[in-house]
Amino acid sequence: MNVSAPVSDLAIECEGLSKRFVVRHRAGRLRRRRVEVAAVDDVSFTVRAGEMVGYLGPNGAGKSTTIKMLTGILTPSGGRVATLGLTPIERRTELARRIGVVFGQRTQLWWDLPLADSFELLHHVYRTERARHEANLATFVDVLDMGPFLATPVRQLSLGQRMRGELTAALLHDPALVVLDEPTIGLDVVSKQAVRDFLLALNRERGTTVLLTTHDLDDVERLCGRMMIIDHGRVIHDGAVDAFKATYGTERTVVVDLVEPGPALEVAGARVTRVDGPRQWLSFDRREVTAAQVVAAIVARTSIQDLSIEEPAIEELVRRVYTAFPAPSDG
Ligand SMILES: Nc1ncnc2c1ncn2[C@@H]1O[C@H](COP(=O)(O)OP(=O)(O)OP(=O)(O)O)[C@@H](O)[C@H]1O
């Protein structure tokens, strides 16, 4: 496919991209009804080389389906897509050498072999230069702290250890673009941080383009300059993370565990939205008060045992986008 801009400028380009699945629903005891699902519906966007973009959406929104089309796993039902200047489904092998893909739920590691053996096998699969392979591996083992479990069979690794292995497997061949599907899902705090730091360094030091799907707004906030939100197959928001937060992500919630259950706390600028025994949820607009002010006001009134600050969930943000810009009727 000819793309209008030089390959080096655009890592991903899709226009009117769609994917429809036909599913059969039970209709009565014997009959089944064919129902068409528009998993991705007329999606257009570009990602410049060197960008880090978050692709967010609730369950079933169409994130994985988009990624599968970008990487040549699924054929689009309509529209066009170019990844690193190539039509993915036609140039799958060539593309595979130039991109890295991590699907959180699937593995590209050999289950029964020690982790290190998978890396060695991938060196042969990608036919990377030995010196480059060794140098990359040494860096990744160091940064992701994989030394202690390199000799462990993959099936015995914890989820966090395996995810570090998956990232390494996807990046050993120096891809220009890495596509990550839920890279931090289910990870403990330490592994999450290790994965995020690693991706940031990769982008900063090597200029690798990163597209990641996630449910986790925290991932996007820490990693990406830009976020797209997909819902029911359509991109309903595409813009800078900062601007989005300033518009939609202004509400925060302090969750506080009191030493003793008590009446709803009264704190200027915050309101109690839920009480469960000694635990209370206080929501506030961070343009009006800071979390520190809310916490200080609580501590001045009562003794607390613990507290945390919650970000709004992606489902809530999607709702706010719709409230601000009601979706056009599909008619
Ligand atoms: N192979 C398939 N056959 C039929 N329907 C499918 C298939 N794959 C996905 N779908 C449907 O397409 C829609 C989008 O699914 P997709 O997996 O892309 O969403 P997602 O945003 O990645 O969700 P999640 O966050 O739950 O992984 C859903 O309604 C899903 O049920």
Image (tube, helix red, strand yellow):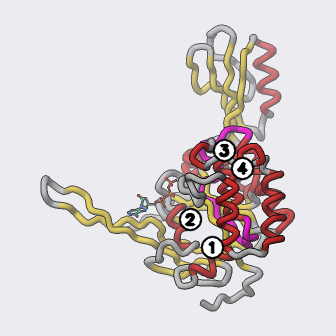
Q: Earlier in the sequence, mark 1 or mark 2?
A: 1
Label 1 Cα crowd, 10 Å radius (few <14 / some 14-19 / many 20+): some
Q: Earlier in the sequence, mark 2 or mark 3?
A: 3
Tell me the quarter of the image containing the N terminus: bottom right
Left/right of residue 155 with respect to residue 301 in the rendered view:
left
User: Can you identify the residue that label 4 sits on?
Assistant: 150
- Name the amino acid type tagged 4: Leu
Residue 330 % position (x, y): 41, 67
Find ligand 1 in the image and state its quadrant: bottom left
User: Can you identify the residue that label 3 sits on?
Assistant: 160
The secondary element bearing badge 4 is classed as: loop
The residue mark sitting in front, 1 or 4, is 4
- Name the amino acid type tagged 2: Val
Q: Does mark 2's beta carbon lie closer than 8 Å to ligand 1? A: no
Residue 70: quadrant of the picture:
bottom right
- Name the amino acid type tagged 3: Gly
Q: Does mark 3's beta carbon lie closer than 8 Å to ligand 1? A: no
Q: CA distance from mark 1 to mark 4?
A: 39 Å
Q: Earlier in the sequence, mark 3 or mark 1?
A: 1
* Residue 55 seen anywhere in this rendered image of the structure: no
Q: CA distance from mark 2 to mark 3?
A: 30 Å
The residue mark sitting in front, 2 or 3, is 3
Left/right of residue 69 with respect to residue 247 in the rendered view:
left
Q: Which residues are magenta?
A: 172-190
Question: Is residue 308 depicted above or below 200 in this figure?
Answer: above
Magenta-drawn stretch contains 330: no
Q: Earlier in the sequence, mark 4 or mark 3?
A: 4
Question: What is the number of the mark on residue 45?
Answer: 1
User: Can you identify the residue that label 2 sits on?
Assistant: 235
Magenta-drawn stretch contains 188: yes
Q: Earlier in the sequence, mark 1 or mark 4?
A: 1
